[in-house]
Amino acid sequence: MTRFQAAEWKLLTDLIQDRFGLTFDGVRCEILESRLEPRLRELHLGSLSDYYRFLRFHPEGDAELGRLTPLITNNETYFFREAHHFDILVRRIVPDLRSALRTRPLRILSAACSSGEEPYSIVIALQNGGLELAGVRWEIDACDLNPERVAQARRGLYDAGSLRACDGEARRRYFRESGGRFELRERYRTGVRFFEANLLAPNGSFGWGSYDAIFCRNMLIYFGEEAFDGVIGLFARSLAPGGYLLLGHSESLLDRATELLPVSFGTGVVYRKRLSD
Ligand SMILES: C[S@@+](CC[C@H](N)C(=O)[O-])C[C@H]1O[C@@H](n2cnc3c(N)ncnc32)[C@H](O)[C@@H]1O
């Protein structure tokens, strides 16, 4: 149940969808309402329509939209989530690139990386796969909409929940425990660059036509159709020829018109850009 009118919700959620791609249905609106109430009180605004007008027309409206991002995003993530993808990267994608990687780094984008568990899991997988010893260098761009999560990613400090898929041995090897929290060891941070980005309005931080692999997992499930297709178009442009896109288990391109082609590696389907036009 929500105390606001359906029409007010529509104004606000249409604006959010337009700017950030995210959609809100009944339950998600109730969660959003409880998160928004304190902010409305702070701004002395009595209704969602007032808040909508503030976002649209107040001189501080754009800054307020930025403040909204921690409230509208679900940032759930953990180390080695959907672990088969890290295996596909190390065992299937990288070996095909071996001769190119003698002269250039492996380039990866972790899009919607939340607090960094995903890009750091990639580094750990590459280290464990012996790539560093083999002289392969990598550059991992990692971005998210929520600035609080990006700041946490840079700190590399985690609660036990983020390590739920790590056994005791993995905890000891990859983290330094202190006061019930876990700090990622320095060697597993190599080559990762974090930045804030809205995938619906990408700025100059992305590489164009340059990524060998893009991980974008568990974000598109919250996106409307138009935003979904727009972001897939962005990824298609950002991938190098022959580059791969890895989506979360509930996300699929199989019923969409896209230039990315499905490839099955046994443990899962990923998508690939053609090697040449
Ligand atoms: C559920 S988390 C997924 C984290 C990680 N990829 C994983 O699979 O564990 C979804 C992330 O998408 C981010 N996100 C949502 N909309 C976004 C947008 N328009 N641009 C960039 N990131 C966005 C959220 O801030 C959130 O951290």
Image (cartoon, rainbow, N blue to C red):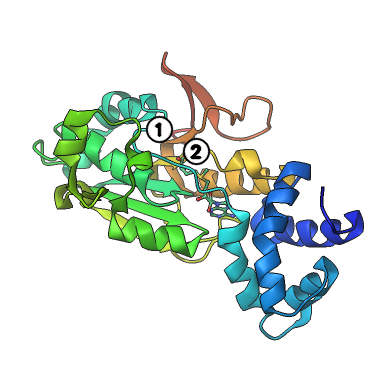
Identity of the residue furthest to the bottom in this view: 59
Queried on whether the Cβ of the residue with tag 1 lies below 8 angstroms from ligand 1, the answer reads yes
Residue 56: x percent and y percent?
76, 75
Disc 2: which residue: 217
Tags 1 and 2 touching, CB below 8 Å: yes
Q: Nearer the viewer, residue 214 or 74?
A: 74
Residue type beneath disc 1: Arg
Queried on whether the Cβ of the residue with tag 2 lies below 8 angstroms from ligand 1, the answer reads yes
Estimate how packed mark 2 is, as few (under 14), some (14 to 19) or many (20 or more) residues with alpha carbons within 10 Å.
many
Give the residue displayed 44% in from the left and 56% down from the top. 143
Which mark's residue is nearer the viewer, 1 or 2? 1
* Left or right position of 244 against 219: left
Identity of the residue furthest to the front in this view: 179
Disc 1: which residue: 81
Residue 237: x percent and y percent?
52, 48
Give the residue displayed 45% in from the left and 44% down from the top. 239
Estimate how packed mark 1 is, as few (under 14), some (14 to 19) or many (20 or more) residues with alpha carbons within 10 Å.
some
8 up-or-down from 242: above or below: below
Residue type beneath disc 2: Arg
